[in-house]
Image (cartoon, rainbow, N blue to C red):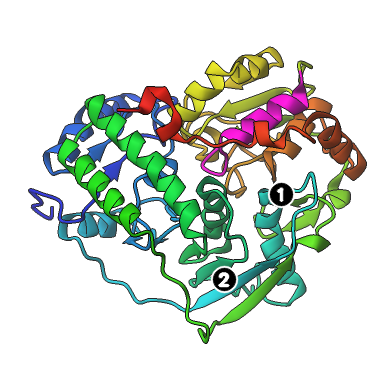
Amino acid sequence: ELACLRYQADLVMQSFCHTAAYPTEVDLRMHATLPAFMTERGGVALKPGDGVVHSWVNRMILPDTVGTGGDSHTRFPVGLSFPAGSGLVAFAAALGIMPLEMPESVLVKVHGSLRPGMTLRDLVNAIPWVAIQQGLLTKEKKGKKNVFNGRVLEIEGLPRLHVEQAFELTDASAERSAAAATIALAPDTVASFIRSDVALLRSLVRDGYQDATTLNRRVEAMEAWLANPVLLERDANAEYAAVVEVNLDTLTEPILACPNDPDDVRLLSEVAGRPVDEVFLGSCMTNIGHFRAAARILDGQRIAVNRLWLTPPTRMDRDQLAAEGVLGQLEAAGARVEIPGCSLCMGNQARVADNAVVFSTSTRNFDNRMGAGAQVFLGSAELGAACALLGRIPTVDEYFQLWRDRIAGREGEIYRYLSFDQMEAYRA
């Protein structure tokens, strides 16, 4: 409709993550025709089964750039993205610009250190938990107060996070109804991630992904940034709509979002013992370390829930987990491994049983999203694996005992992230 013969945005990418797992006849036609439409205009076309669009675009962005995406979870950890409707995304792709009124920001200042067994997903849920205590957020829908709504969520105090970890925090800003999110990271941390991304993009070109010109141009831009790896920093006197301070030292037990509202966050001790029917470990909120941790917690034992769904976010995660034997270990425990993509998180593909109680690592738990009448808890993959093992939400003591027995001392082995520049299969 925009008569676009060539995209003016520097990078335009599409993925089939919403339709890959259980495609309809219409989906299959789109899988066959959309890639050519994209690449003829200079876009990058992924393939069904490549994985979640946000997990991919995160590996293609340039630091301190602005973007948009047709999904509410398109949120860069090393830049700034404002998700939009498909019409506005098409406008931005075609013209390389988009109308935008920059909103105010809310600053989330993180202090202290996570105690062993606490995870970044607990920090994700701690942000609304602290905001509720400060009177900046209410759970009730009537007259709801939400300081994050329509604003940019700026996070600082965790400069050494791996970018894949940082993405977990910015991604979850969608559930805060924030317009966008960003996080302050150290330049060398970002540079390490960008070097890995260069190797991945080069491998795409070698494997015949199109548009090769666009991919090569992005590689050149990444290498130019690596030659002078400088990141923007906020002004010391920057003003914010509000400041939310999270002291990690005070977080002594996991925090979950409870059915069926991502703002209804509660401590594990408040919901322990609730029977769980199904567990989903997947979505853009997961990375490779989460699946290794789940395998360690299950440790060769059979699941006690009706179903454990596993969906690695990208084919690269899946392939590495398979090569390490982690997927086989999880399947032996009774897990059902889905094609990389959105799976249960979207709710338009596979569905949980009607009225099931579900523990999920997915992004949101709105009514009927994952299944008719489903009651969905949101939390970490580690806690999800414990639920799958026990068939119920564990007590605080049970959870930390599992952590000490099966993960403690192995963190360096478990929480390793994909560095494509150090992997033979991706080297030029």
Tell me the SS state at disc 2. loop
Q: Which residues are magenta?
A: 282-299
In this view of the protein, which residue sits in the foreground, 45 or 204? 204
Q: Tell me, yes or no, whether the highlighted magenta stretch contains residue 333.
A: no
Can you say whether 360 is above or below 329 in the image? below
How many numbered circles are shown?
2
Badge 2 is on which residue? 148
**C-alpha separation, residue under disc 1 versus residue under disc 2:** 21 Å
Instruction: Residue at 21%, 59% (x, y): give it.
Output: 91
Whether residue 308 is visible, yes or no, is yes
In this view of the protein, which residue sits in the foreground, 223 or 2? 223
Where, by quadrant of the figure, is residue 406 drawn?
top right
Instruction: Residue at 48%, 54% (x, y): give it.
Output: 188
Residue 364 horizontal/vertical position (percent): 59, 49
Whether residue 12 is visible, yes or no, is no
In this view of the protein, which residue sits in the foreground, 361 or 417? 417
